[in-house]
């Protein structure tokens, strides 16, 4: 061997000794799933019905197969962005920065709604419509430079952006404006006003990107105390990564080697669906509280149990689908997306079986 030739065996040995030979996606852990299991193991008011979970796994997978539900389903919705570029990355970041709490106060009243492209959009879709409408009007609502420009991004402009086409204003408007400005400041100070920097720092790891998001942006730091332990949910941080993965179909800015570490997104819709499917069971006091449409405070033990047990329940459903269908290409993200779409279809047909729990917070 000449002096200028590379000794690959020596290089490999050096990398191994320094720990550089490890898959960069293997070390990162959000610990959301482990915390969910802890909540489930110590839950008093929410239980998982294992027979119901096994039956639901078969039902869900059969329905997903029948509908040809897959990663590509995300981009098929008319409101989701179609281009595969930085502008879409910014759109997704903004969307999930603000993706929380849309239900109306009144049980039978019309909630916040947006008229866009000849349709009336409610819930999550009202937010997507808000962003698309603002961009159509020349307002750079998805640009982090805009958020931290106090002369351009005024309260009046944001109130115009989030204007309602119903009699109900968007819930938690001040909190949404605060999230935008906080994120703008962090983006400017740490990431050069580019979320691509975050993606690059994560080195292809979904878990590392979630951890970076919650460490950098306080408004994504979705945690609660349960007993003597802090438990992590990270709903919006996780769905942000999942939306990138789905939009870019696992490639480019959406390529993550450990995407299956992402759990379901603990909100108020998936527990509702899991209860309807017979997977989650509630104690009489909690069940009565939900059916009476009474609010549950954020971080109340009931709310923590609902969220933690839902994450663990979807994990059990995922495992059961794979046990019954070893070659199935399914993860918690796809199961969550499918269950959410299903409950929204039931809502549109006015066939929802049970109410969802009601908690006002920026976490979901």
Image (tube, rainbow, N blue to C red):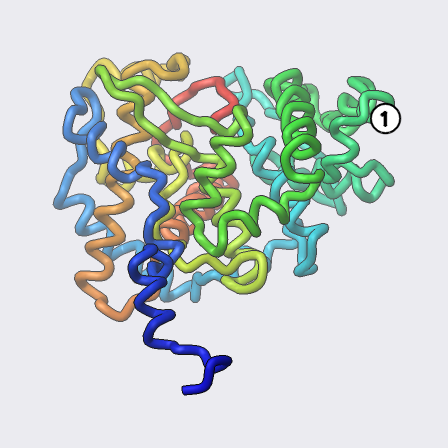
Placement of 87 over or under 148, stated as above or below: below
How many neighbours does mark 1 have within 10 angstroms: few (below 14), some (14-19), or many (20 or more)?
A: some
User: Closest to the observer: 73 or 110?
Assistant: 73
Who's the residue at 76% across and 24% down the image? 158
Q: Position of residue 133 (x, y in %)?
A: 77, 40
Q: Position of residue 107 (x, y in %)?
A: 49, 19
User: Closest to the observer: 273 or 254?
Assistant: 254
Can residue 115 be seen in this snapshot? no
Q: In the image, is 5 to the left or to the right of 97?
A: left
Who's the residue at 22% across and 66% down the image? 325
Q: In the image, is 263 to the left or to the right of 238?
A: left
Can residue 116 be seen in this snapshot? yes
Secondary structure type for disc 1: loop
Q: Classify the position of the N terminus by image quarter.
A: bottom left
Q: Position of residue 237 (x, y in %)?
A: 48, 37
Find the residue positioned furthest to the bottom: 1
* Res. 18 image quadrant: bottom left
Find the residue positioned furthest to the front: 3
Who's the residue at 55% across and 29% down the image? 217
Who's the residue at 47% across and 37% down the image? 350
Q: In the image, is 335 to the left or to the right of 88?
A: left
| Residue denoted by label 1 | 152
């Amino acid at each position: 061997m000449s002096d200028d030739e590379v000794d690959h065996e020596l290089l490999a040995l050096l990398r191994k000794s320094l720990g550089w030979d490890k898959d960069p996606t293997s070390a990162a852990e959000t610990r959301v799933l482990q915390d969910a299991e802890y909540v489930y193991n110590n839950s008093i008011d929410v239980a998982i019905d294992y027979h119901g979970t096994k039956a639901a796994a078969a039902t869900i997978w059969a329905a997903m197969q029948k509908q040809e539900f897959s990663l590509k389903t995300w981009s098929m919705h008319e409101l989701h962005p179609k281009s595969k570029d930085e502008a879409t990355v910014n759109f997704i970041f903004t969307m999930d920065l603000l993706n929380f709490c849309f239900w109306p106060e009144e049980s039978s009243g019309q909630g916040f709604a947006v008229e866009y492209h000849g349709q009336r959009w409610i819930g999550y879709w009202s937010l997507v419509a808000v962003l698309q409408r603002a961009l159509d009007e020349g307002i750079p609502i998805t640009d982090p430079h805009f958020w931290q420009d106090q002369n351009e991004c005024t309260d009046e402009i944001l109130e115009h952006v989030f204007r309602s086409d119903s009699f109900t204003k968007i819930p938690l408007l001040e909190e949404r404006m605060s999230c935008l400005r906080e994120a703008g400041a962090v983006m400017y100070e740490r990431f050069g006003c580019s979320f691509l920097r975050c993606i690059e720092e994560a080195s292809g790891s979904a878990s590392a990107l979630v951890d970076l998001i919650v460490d950098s942006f306080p408004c994504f730091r979705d945690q609660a105390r349960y007993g003597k332990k802090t438990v992590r949910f990270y709903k919006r941080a996780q769905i942000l990564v999942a939306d990138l993965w789905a939009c870019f179909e696992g490639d480019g800015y959406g390529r993550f080697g450990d995407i299956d570490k992402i759990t379901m997104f603990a909100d108020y819709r998936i527990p509702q669906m899991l209860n309807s499917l017979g997977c989650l069971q509630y104690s009489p006091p909690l069940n009565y509280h939900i059916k009476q449409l009474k609010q549950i405070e954020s971080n109340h033990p009931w709310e923590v149990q609902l969220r933690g047990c839902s994450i663990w329940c979807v994990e059990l459903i995922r495992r059961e689908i794979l046990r019954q269908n070893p070659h199935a290409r399914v993860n918690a993200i796809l199961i969550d997306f499918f269950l959410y779409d299903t409950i929204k279809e039931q809502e549109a047909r006015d066939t929802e079986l049970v109410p969802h729990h009601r908690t006002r917070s920026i976490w979901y």
